[in-house]
């Protein structure tokens, strides 16, 4: 059983509000075409084609040496992201705004900023929330604004039942089932 963690110092964590970092990346044609192949799409992208929505997630990697990673595989906390002591980091939600498509083959810039840090106590214990805003632009114009809500959670309480999953919506206009298999999982 793990030891209880000290209280959250919200005043200290809020000092990260407004902190920013900038990354530049090439919307490389080979990476885009590899994604299309992974999804078994017949598309073949060329420089200048519109990058499909959400495929910007293929870029702007955070590349860190293993010695700079935390136990969750992400860069250690306290650099760009605040040093929240709660051990379990999860994606809690987000919002996307598409102003213009990114072009395959173009160089894009992502400006990331800590927008808000807050805390509360829920049924599962202490929670800390960090909202990160990303603005992605190319050729001097904003293409995408995205907000990520990250939640940090305490260790599970001894004997606590896991939360029940909320069923996925069933009213989608279209769907496609992709069944992972060993080839898809280890595809290079």
Image (cartoon, rainbow, N blue to C red):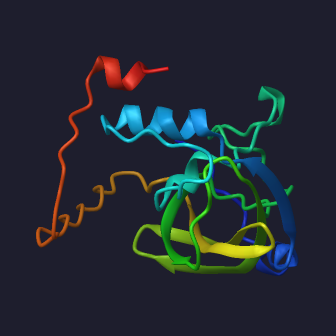
| Residue 63 visible to the viewer | yes
Work out whether residue 8 or residue 135 is closer to the camera in this orientation and state it. 135
- Which residue is pictured at 76% across the width and 37% down the height? 63
Q: Could you say which is closer to the camera, residue 90 or residue 187?
A: 187
Q: Quadrant of residue 149?
A: bottom right
Instruction: Name the residue nearer the viewer: 93 or 37.
Output: 37
Picture coordinates of residue 153, whole percent (x, y): 54, 61
Lateral position of residue 172 relative to residue 136, left or right: left
Horizontal and vertical percent position of residue 46: 55, 43
30 up-or-down from 80: above or below: above
Q: Residue at x 81, y 29 (%)?
A: 65
Q: Is residue 44 above or below residue 172?
A: above
What is the x, y in percent for residue 123?
A: 40, 74
Residue ID at (80%, 36%):
64
Residue 132 visible somewhere in the drawing: no
Residue 163: % across, % down? 29, 61
Is residue 174 left or right of 72 when viewed as pictured? left
Looking at the image, the residue that sits furthest to the left is: 170
Q: Nearer the viewer, residue 118 or 93?
A: 93
175 relative position to 68: left or right: left
Left or right: 11 as drawn, with respect to 126? right
Within the image, what quadrant is residue 137 found in? bottom right
Residue located 60% across and 73% down the image: 146
């Amino acid at each position: 059983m793990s030891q209880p963690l000290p209280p959250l110092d919200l005043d200290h964590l809020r000092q990260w509000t407004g902190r920013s970092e900038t990354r530049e990346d090439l919307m490389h044609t080979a990476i885009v075409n590899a994604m299309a192949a992974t999804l078994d799409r017949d598309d073949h992208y060329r420089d200048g084609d519109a990058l499909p929505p959400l495929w910007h997630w293929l870029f702007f990697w955070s590349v860190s040496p293993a010695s700079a990673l935390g136990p969750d595989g992400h860069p250690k906390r306290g650099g760009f992201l605040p040093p929240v002591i709660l051990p379990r980091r999860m994606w809690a939600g987000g919002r996307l705004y598409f102003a213009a498509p990114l072009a395959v083959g173009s160089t894009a810039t992502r400006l990331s900023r800590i927008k808000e840090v807050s805390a509360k106590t829920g049924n599962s214990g202490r929670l800390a929330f960090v909202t990160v805003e990303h603005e992605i632009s190319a050729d001097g114009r904003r293409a995408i604004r995205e907000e990520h809500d990250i939640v940090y959670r305490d260790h599970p309480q001894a004997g606590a039942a896991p939360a029940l999953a909320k069923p996925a919506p069933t009213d989608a206009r279209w769907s496609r089932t992709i069944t992972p298999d060993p080839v898809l999982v280890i595809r290079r």
